[in-house]
Each structure stands twice: as C-alpha cells, then as structure tokens.
Image: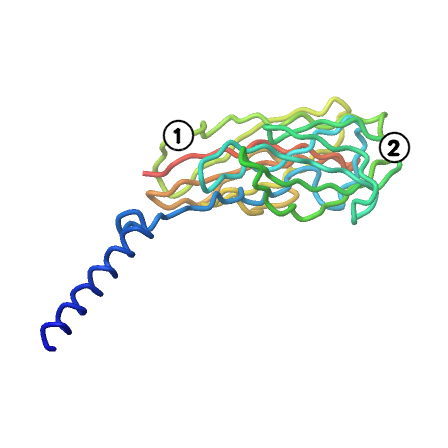
C-alpha cells in the first residue's frame, strides 16, 4: 500500500509540471507592453485673453515627447465657443506652428492635442481665448526678437550675464519686453514690461539656462521669440 501511495504522488507531480509547461509554452509567461500616449502640449501664442490686430495669425505651442519614442503629430482646433461645438479651423501637422487667416471682431478659442503613429492621443491642452480687433489690418506685429547674445548653447562663466536681443516695429509703436528666464524649459516670467532690449541676470555654475522674449506694442500686438539656452561653467 505504501508503494502505491508513492507511485500516485510521483504521477501527480509529473502531471502538474507537464500541464504547467504546456500552458505557458515551456514555463515562460509572455510579457506584453502597452504603447503609451504622448504628453499634453502647452500653448504658447496667442496668449490667453490677448487682443490681436493681425488677421494672418501664427499659432505656436511646445514640442512634446512620446514615452515610446514614436513620431508625434499635433491636432489644433479653433472655435468660437469654449466647448468647441463650432470648430472653424482644424489641422493636423508635425510642426509646432500653424498659421490661419482669421476674421475681425471675433473671440476665438483654441486648443491642441498630440497623436503618435500608433494613434494614441494625449488629452487636449488647456483652452485659451483671444480677440481680433475690427481694424486689425491697419497695424503690423513687431518683428520676432533676434538673438544677440549669449549665442545658443554657449558656455559662459561668472556670476552675471547680459541677455541681449533686438527687434523692429514698422509702425514705430512703443515696444515693451517680457523676459522669461530660468533653469527649466519652458522658462518662467522673470521681468515684465521692460523698455530696453538687454537684461542683466544672476547665474550659478554648472547650470543650463533657458530664456525667451515676448515683444508687445501699444496696440496690444505681441510677437514671441524662440527659447534660447546657454550653459554655465
């Protein structure tokens, strides 16, 4: 009787291992990974509640990354209500800018989302609104700020540095500058309403700094420059 019990136990163990190997392809449990959606874009221009006097308006938002390294396209929507029940303009683009020819005297709402090559989509960005003046065609936006120094990617030393740029306004409007500066990208607002196109800032060693200039004239037009960067030693 004892031998019979031992035999039954050995057979049961053999069957258990046999079933485990058959069910899992030799005992290996397959691991699958889910392709993720891209990050949510941040809107840059036109800024929220801006009054624009230019109809042919360039929309700008930040580049986003995809967790799986997939290529990313952007879907932009422009509507006349914040629920986007009436979408007037929409486009799919691989760029982070898009220009639309708008109508005068209208409040617009806009948003952007990202989509990767596997059709995974981010949530929409926050919604921002702006208004186009009825006489928008009589004024021209200031030119986009042009970098003087420090040059992009430059390595600098010291405890302070001068951020230097230039621009023009064909209407000869009064121009003010908002400067965004810091060690994060995008940088945060550092100085607002500055009247001259140079700014001295304190810096620390072994740091990458990012900065950006927004130009505003007295007709509430605005031009946004690209994000520049430099590194301290």
Q: Quick one: SS at disc 1?
A: strand
> Which residue is denoted by mark 2 in the rendering?
104
Q: Nearer the viewer, residue 98 or 217?
A: 98
Taking 215 as reference, is 207 left or right? left
Circle 2 residues within 10 Å: few <14, some 14–19, many ≥20: some
Q: Quadrant of the N terminus?
A: bottom left
Rendering quarter of residue 158: top left
Q: Is 73 situated above or below 124?
A: above
Q: Residue at x 86, y 31 (%)?
A: 103
Residue 128 pos. (x, y %): 72, 45
Q: Residue at x 54, y 33 (%)?
A: 117
- Dividing the picture into quarters, in which one does residue 170 lie? top right
Describe residue 139's horizontal placement relative to residue 122 as left or right: right
Residue projecting furthest to the front: 1
Q: CA distance from mark 1 to mark 2?
A: 43 Å
Label for residue 56? none
Q: Position of residue 216 (x, y in %)?
A: 70, 36
Q: From this view, report whether residue 32 is shown above or below residue 136.
A: below
| Labels in figure, total | 2
Q: Which residue is mark 1?
A: 154
Q: Is residue 30 left or right of residue 149?
A: left
What percent of the width, then of the height, locates residue 81?
82, 46
Q: How is the image coloured?
A: rainbow
Q: Position of residue 28 (x, y in %)?
A: 29, 49
- Density class for disc 1 (Cα within 10 Å; few <14, some 14-19, many ≥20) is few
Could you tell which of marks 1 and 2 lies nearer the N-terminus? 2
């Amino acid at each position: 009787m004892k031998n019979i019990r031992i035999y039954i136990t050995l057979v049961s163990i053999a069957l258990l291992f046999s079933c485990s190997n058959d069910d899992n392809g030799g005992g290996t449990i397959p691991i699958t990974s889910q392709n993720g959606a891209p990050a949510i874009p941040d809107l840059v221009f036109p800024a929220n509640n801006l009054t624009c006097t230019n109809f042919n308006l360039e929309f700008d938002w930040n580049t986003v990354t995809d967790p799986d390294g997939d290529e990313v396209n952007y879907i932009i929507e422009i509507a006349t209500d914040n629920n986007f029940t009436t979408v007037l303009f929409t486009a799919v683009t691989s760029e982070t800018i898009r220009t639309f020819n708008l109508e005068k005297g209208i409040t617009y709402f806009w948003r952007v989302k990202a989509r990767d090559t596997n059709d995974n989509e981010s949530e929409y960005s926050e919604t921002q609104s702006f208004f186009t003046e009825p006489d928008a065609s009589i004024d021209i936006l200031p030119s986009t700020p042009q970098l003087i120094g420090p040059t992009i990617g430059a390595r600098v030393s010291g405890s302070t540095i001068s951020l230097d740029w230039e621009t023009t306004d064909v209407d000869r409007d009064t121009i003010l500058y908002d400067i965004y500066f810091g060690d994060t990208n995008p940088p945060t607002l550092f100085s607002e309403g500055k009247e001259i196109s140079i700014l001295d800032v304190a810096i620390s060693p072994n740091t990458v700094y990012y900065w950006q200039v927004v130009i505003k004239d007295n007709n509430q037009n605005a031009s946004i420059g690209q994000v520049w960067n430099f590194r301290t030693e």
